[in-house]
Amino acid sequence: MTKHAHHATHPDIVKRLKRANGHLLSVIEMIEAQRPCTDIAQQLHAVEKAITQAKRTLIQDHIDRCLDAAMAGADGEGTPATAQFKAITKYL
């Protein structure tokens, strides 16, 4: 397995995922305690948002750091192609 460089956003991503994990553990406890479905749904929504934001941050960081460098190295003018790719990934 190849080890990749640590990005500046990784600590934030880890923090978001740990928060999502905490929410998920709460959901399990709420289901076991037979809490109201609306409360459970609210916690599941929080888990989903935290994971989605972590994914977006990871992908954007990868594009900013890795793909920009690769594109610039390939032809020296990778910016327009990656700018379009960055724009579309915001809708993930």
Image (tube, rainbow, N blue to C red):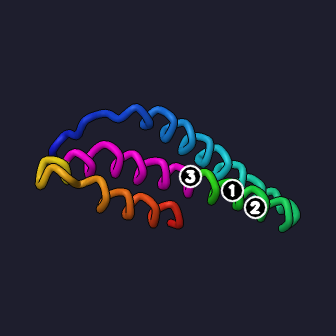
Query: Residue 1 in the image: x percent, y percent?
Result: 15, 47
Residue 28 is tagged as 1
Asked whether residue 60 is drawn in magenta, I would say: yes
Kindly indicate whether the residue at mark 1 contacts the one at mark 2 (C-beta within 8 angstroms): yes
The reply, left or right, for residue 43 in relation to residue 37 is left
Q: Which amino acid does label 3 sit on?
A: Gln
Which residue is painted at 75% across and 59% down in the image? 32
Q: Which of 53 and 3 is in front in this view?
A: 53
Kindly indicate whether the residue at mark 3 contacts the one at mark 1 (C-beta within 8 angstroms): no
**In the image, which is nearer the foreground, mark 1 or mark 3?**
3
Query: Residue 56 in the image: x percent, y percent?
Result: 49, 54
Residue 22 location, quadrant: top right
Looking at the rendered structure, the secondary structure element under dot 3 is: helix
Q: Distance between the residues labelled 1 and 3?
A: 22 Å
Which residue is painted at 13% across and 47% down in the image? 73
Residue 42 location, quadrant: bottom right
Q: Which residue carries the number 3 mark?
A: 53
Query: Residue 54 in the image: x percent, y percent?
Result: 51, 49
Magenta-colored span: 51-69
Q: Which of 49 and 71 is in front in this view?
A: 71
Query: Residue 52 in the image: x percent, y percent?
Result: 56, 57
Residue 17 is tagged as none
Q: Nearer the viewer, residue 64 or 23?
A: 64
Main secondary-structure element of the magenta-colored stretch: helix
In the rendered view, tell whether residue 77 sits above or below residue 18.
below
